[in-house]
């Protein structure tokens, strides 16, 4: 598994830990070094942008993990 795939899997696991009802769509490749990620719960949808480097570093750096977890929690709370 390459670095981006590993990061995407970690991101999906974080979302599942926060709320299992949230559906996630992560693009295959980033645009301008950013991933525009869709979070959907019921009829509500929220888009968040995560830098490509953060996805790559997500499984290995606790500071990135903390930052991305907060971003996900804020987005899920807004759904």
Image (tube, rainbow, N blue to C red):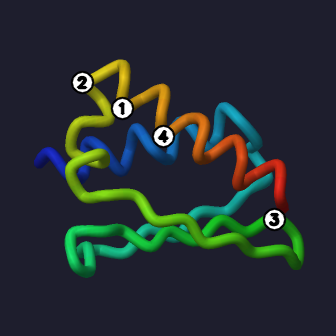
Up-down relation of residue 64 to residue 53 (above or below):
above
Q: Badge 4: how crowded within 10 Å, few (<14), some, or many (20+)?
A: some
Q: Earlier in the sequence, mark 4 or mark 2?
A: 2
Which quarter shows the N terminus?
top left
Mark 1 → mark 4, Cα distance in angstroms: 6 Å
- Horizontal side of 73 relative to 31 (left or right) equals right
Distance from disc 1 to disc 3, alpha carbons, whole Å, reads: 25 Å
Q: Which residue is mark 3?
A: 41
Mark 2 neighbour class, 10 Å CA radius: few under 14, some 14 to 19, many 20 or more:
some
**Labels 2 and 1 touching (C-beta < 8 A):** yes
Label 3 residue SS: strand
Q: Nearer the viewer, mark 3 or mark 4?
A: 4
Q: Is residue 35 left or right of residue 11?
A: left
Dot 1 or dot 3: first in sequence order is: 3
Left or right relative to 3: residue 8: right
Residues at marks 2 and 3, CA–CA distance in whole angstroms: 28 Å
* Residue at position x 25%, y 42% in the image: 6
Q: Quadrant of the C terminus?
A: bottom right
Where does label 1 land, which residue?
64
Quadrant of the image occupied by residue 48: bottom right
Residue beneath the point at 26% across and 73% down: 30
Q: From the viewer's perspective, is residue 19 above or below residue 78? A: above
Task: Categorize mark 1 by other alpha carbons within 10 Å: few (<14), some (14-19), many (20+).
Answer: some
- Residue 60 badge: 2
Which dot, 4 or 2, sits closer to the camera? 4
């Amino acid at each position: 598994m390459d670095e981006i795939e590993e990061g995407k899997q970690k991101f999906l696991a974080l979302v599942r830990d926060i709320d299992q009802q949230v559906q996630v769509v992560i693009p295959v490749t980033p645009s301008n070094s950013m991933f525009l990620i869709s979070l959907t719960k019921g009829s509500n949808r929220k888009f968040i942008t995560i830098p490509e480097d953060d996805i790559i570093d997500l499984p290995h750096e606790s500071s990135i993990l903390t930052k991305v977890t907060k971003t996900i929690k804020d987005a899920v709370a807004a759904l």
